[in-house]
């Protein structure tokens, strides 16, 4: 028998040892308990003197309340002088006449008139009126029938009993509609319970439907009930700001003139590519078209609020358009429908038109991206003349600004902050002159708890065309000599972004809590999100299946080059709703990059999601020569066979926003492809999981700890929110 040289034996031992598993790490219940300290229910109350929300009084003063270590403090402010008075209760602060003010008793399903004397509500598909002084009730319409009723908001993902109406200034008329949904697809969900299941059924339009919800526009006189039908073809139930006609909860895209003889409104086409401004005669129902705008992708009238205005006194219209690649304001002649001139110009986005001073012909508006060297999502307040001259920045601080004007628009309260710096609230005149600093938020107690702010990051888009902005969350006990796996949270929009608000927040979802368990959590607003240029927002128009994932990958790789502790070879992803769609797409289409994914409540196939969202961002459903439609190639289940990593799917069984069949399609495809995966169904939960959300959060932690960190999570840990 030959002797084996010692060095060969040593080499063999080293070789065999390289295949031995590393010791399994254990994440304890104490680790999880520590992580929960970074959730909102444990952090928000540690921020003092923040969130100034003024309530303006009819004498010109305003009050607000702030939390302090000693309890709630109430503050009354004289805006002319900035003088403040404080008290521990509202009763001890306000003059007696303000203490006696009471709002009329109005339930959620009623809409109050401007004079405060009456409300309207829906009963048996018709509109009814209740006099608040006498209690008398009377029927305003009588021909409403099932699924063809007045002012209804009861189809699709929104189901409300509240009427969608716009009261006239004199409280004598209502602008509303009769909604035809008789021809639509039905959606079915089944409540899980002991005994016979309970069926939930309602109208839920889909892109495959030949016709969508149609609204027949009407004006209703209320003193002596009378319905005036507007002489215009029924409109698709669409709006200029979002998918729906009632983004704000009221009848959007409608304005009365002062004496309620005219009604201005915008009709939006089914695919959101056409917006038509029209004027109706309130007495006869006669309608005149003023002008229309047609775009190649989708028209929208702003970000956060509708920005067009009806100015009958001067026979003008302020119109919002992205025709020069940026969201700007334009002035039109109301009679001729001709463009007078563009009011705002430049490489920035007007987001919200807050006030129109018709007397002095000055506009006050919020905008993003005008100030160089700042996060382009920071919002500032400006003013400009109707002529486009004398543009002035009114909120100079490098932060995101939240504005509350006084009723007479002579003053405004500006609460500004960033994701990393707490809010400061100041009082200014309408010209921007600072009168007083109202509050500076104190986060000393928050910091003492071990909290740290997320780190703002900037990366290049995958195509190198744009700068992208985001936040990075690292453990408070970060060891830069180690490697940390990445959790990529994603919400691709196109109607929103992953980061969300640029205001200060003590906790953003569970990002910091998850980071505490040993991860780097990266959140990036990819291209195709709103709030920037038209080209940026339209980057994925027609095919949203990209889900900004190439941008996410590019950004993570760039950050890993800058921060060596980021392990870009060990990346997980999660998201909810549109983010759930993106997370599953990441696992199916980018398996070389993402190894663990959690897809919650995903709209995995937009042929199974409400028509208006997909038709806004994808376009109308069309058929090719072989019968294939333009939505099919974007459906996640078609790529399920590509799964290589670990995937957890979750959905609410009573999700009436994104029906659970979206996830079931993916489940069915994974089974047919013989793929291993995990699934959680919350039988009676809606879209956000409700009371089951903390269970889902814990399971999400477990999944990343086990499959991305390679550790053993504690069994059955319970996240218990502070009530």
Image (cartoon, rainbow, N blue to C red):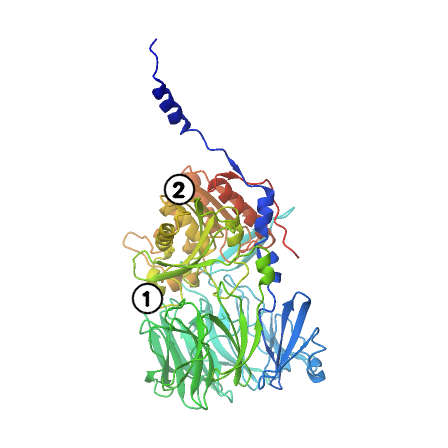
Residue 162 place in picture, x, y as percent: 58, 70
Disc assigned to residue 618: none
Sort mark 2 into few (<14), some (14-19) or many (20+) by Cα contacts within 10 Å: many
Q: Secondary structure at mark 1?
A: helix
Q: Is residue 212 found left or right of 540 in the rendered image?
A: right
Sort mark 1 into few (<14), some (14-19) or many (20+) by Cα contacts within 10 Å: some
Q: Name above or below for residue 182 compared with residue 191.
A: below
Q: Name above or below for residue 119 compared with residue 1.
A: below
Which residue is at 34% across, 87% downward? Answer: 336
Which quadrant of the rendered structure holds the N terminus?
A: top left
Choose between 222 and 81: the one closer to the eye.
81
Choose between 16 and 347: the one closer to the eye.
16
Q: Is residue 77 found left or right of 354 in the rendered image?
A: right
Residue 610 place in picture, x, y as percent: 45, 60
Disc assigned to residue 643: 2
Residue 85 place in picture, x, y as percent: 66, 79
Q: Disc 1 and disc 2: Cα gap in Å?
A: 32 Å
Q: Name above or below for residue 617 compared with residue 600.
A: below
Which residue is at 59% across, 57% downward? Answer: 448
Choose between 140 and 430: the one closer to the eye.
430
Q: Secondary structure at mark 2?
A: loop
Does residue 231 appear in this view? Answer: no
Q: Which residue is mark 1?
A: 535
Considering only order in the chain, which callout, 2 or 1, is on the residue closer to the N terminus?
Answer: 1
């Amino acid at each position: 028998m030959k002797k084996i040289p010692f060095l060969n034996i040593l080499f063999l031992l080293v070789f065999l040892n390289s295949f031995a598993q590393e010791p399994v790490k254990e994440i304890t219940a104490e680790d999880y308990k520590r992580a929960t300290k970074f959730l909102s229910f444990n952090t928000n109350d540690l921020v003092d003197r923040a969130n100034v929300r003024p309530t303006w009084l009819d004498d010109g003063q305003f009050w607000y309340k702030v939390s302090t270590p000693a309890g709630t403090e109430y503050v009354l402010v004289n805006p002319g002088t900035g003088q403040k008075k404080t008290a521990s209760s509202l009763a001890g602060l306000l003059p007696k006449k303000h203490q006696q003010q009471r709002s009329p008793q109005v339930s959620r399903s009623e809409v109050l008139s401007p004079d405060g004397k009456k409300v309207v509500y829906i009963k048996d598909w018709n509109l009814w009126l209740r006099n608040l002084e006498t209690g008398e009730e009377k029927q305003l319409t009588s021909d409403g029938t099932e699924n063809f009723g007045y002012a209804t908001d009861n189809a699709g993902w929104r189901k409300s009993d509240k009427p969608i109406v716009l009261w006239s200034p004199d409280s004598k008329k209502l602008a509303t509609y009769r909604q035809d949904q008789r021809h639509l697809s039905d959606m079915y969900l089944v409540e899980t319970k002991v005994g016979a299941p309970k069926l939930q059924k309602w109208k839920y339009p889909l892109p495959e439907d030949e016709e969508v919800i149609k609204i027949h526009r009407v004006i209703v006189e209320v003193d002596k009930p009378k319905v005036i039908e507007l002489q215009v073809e029924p409109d698709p139930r669409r709006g200029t700001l979002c998918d729906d006609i009632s983004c704000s909860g009221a009848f959007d895209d409608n304005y009365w003139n002062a004496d309620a003889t005219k009604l201005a409104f915008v009709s939006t086409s089914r695919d959101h590519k056409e917006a038509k401004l029209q004027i109706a005669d309130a007495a006869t129902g006669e309608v005149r078209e003023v002008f229309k705008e047609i775009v190649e992708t989708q028209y929208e009238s702003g970000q956060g609020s509708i920005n067009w205005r009806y100015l009958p006194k001067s026979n003008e219209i302020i119109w919002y358009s992205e025709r020069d690649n940026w969201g700007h304001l334009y002035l039109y002649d109301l009679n001729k429908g001709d463009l007078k001139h563009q009011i705002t110009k430049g490489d920035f986005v007007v987001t919200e038109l807050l006030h129109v001073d018709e007397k002095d012909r000055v506009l006050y508006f919020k905008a993003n991206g005008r100030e160089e060297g700042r996060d382009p999502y920071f919002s500032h307040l400006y003013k400009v003349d109707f002529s486009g001259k004398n543009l002035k920045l009114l909120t100079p601080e490098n932060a995101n600004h939240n504005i509350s004007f006084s009723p007479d628009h002579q003053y405004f309260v500006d609460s500004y902050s960033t994701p990393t710096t707490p809010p400061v609230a100041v009082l200014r005149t309408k010209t921007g002159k600072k009168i007083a600093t109202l509050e500076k938020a104190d986060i000393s107690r928050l910091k003492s708890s071990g909290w740290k702010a997320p780190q703002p990051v900037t990366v290049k888009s995958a195509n190198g065309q744009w700068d992208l902005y985001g936040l990075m969350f690292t453990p408070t006990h970060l060891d830069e000599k180690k490697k940390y796996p990445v959790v990529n949270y994603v919400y691709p929009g196109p109607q929103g972004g992953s980061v969300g608000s640029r205001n200060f927040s003590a906790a953003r979802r569970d990002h910091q809590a998850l980071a505490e368990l040993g991860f780097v959590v990266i959140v990036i607003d990819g291209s195709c999100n709103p709030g920037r240029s038209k080209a940026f927002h339209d980057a994925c128009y027609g095919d949203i299946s990209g889900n900004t994932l190439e941008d996410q990958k590019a950004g993570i790789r760039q950050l890993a080059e800058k921060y060596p502790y980021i392990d870009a070879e060990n990346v997980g992803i999660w998201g909810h709703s549109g983010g759930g769609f993106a997370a599953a797409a990441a696992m199916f289409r980018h398996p070389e990059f993402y190894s663990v994914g959690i897809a919650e409540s995903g709209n995995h196939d937009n042929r199974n999601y409400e028509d208006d969202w997909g038709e806004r961002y994808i376009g109308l459903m069309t058929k090719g020569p072989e019968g294939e439609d333009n939505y099919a190639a974007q459906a996640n289940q078609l790529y399920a066979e590509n799964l290589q990593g670990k995937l957890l799917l979750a959905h609410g069984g009573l999700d009436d926003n994104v029906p659970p069949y979206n996830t079931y399609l993916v489940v069915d495809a994974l089974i047919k492809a013989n793929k291993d995966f995990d699934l959680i169904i919350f039988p009676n939960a809606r879209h956000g999981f409700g009371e089951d959300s903390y269970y889902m959060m814990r399971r999400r932690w477990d999944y990343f700890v086990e499959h991305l960190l390679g550790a053993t999570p504690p069994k059955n840990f319970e996240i218990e929110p502070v009530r």
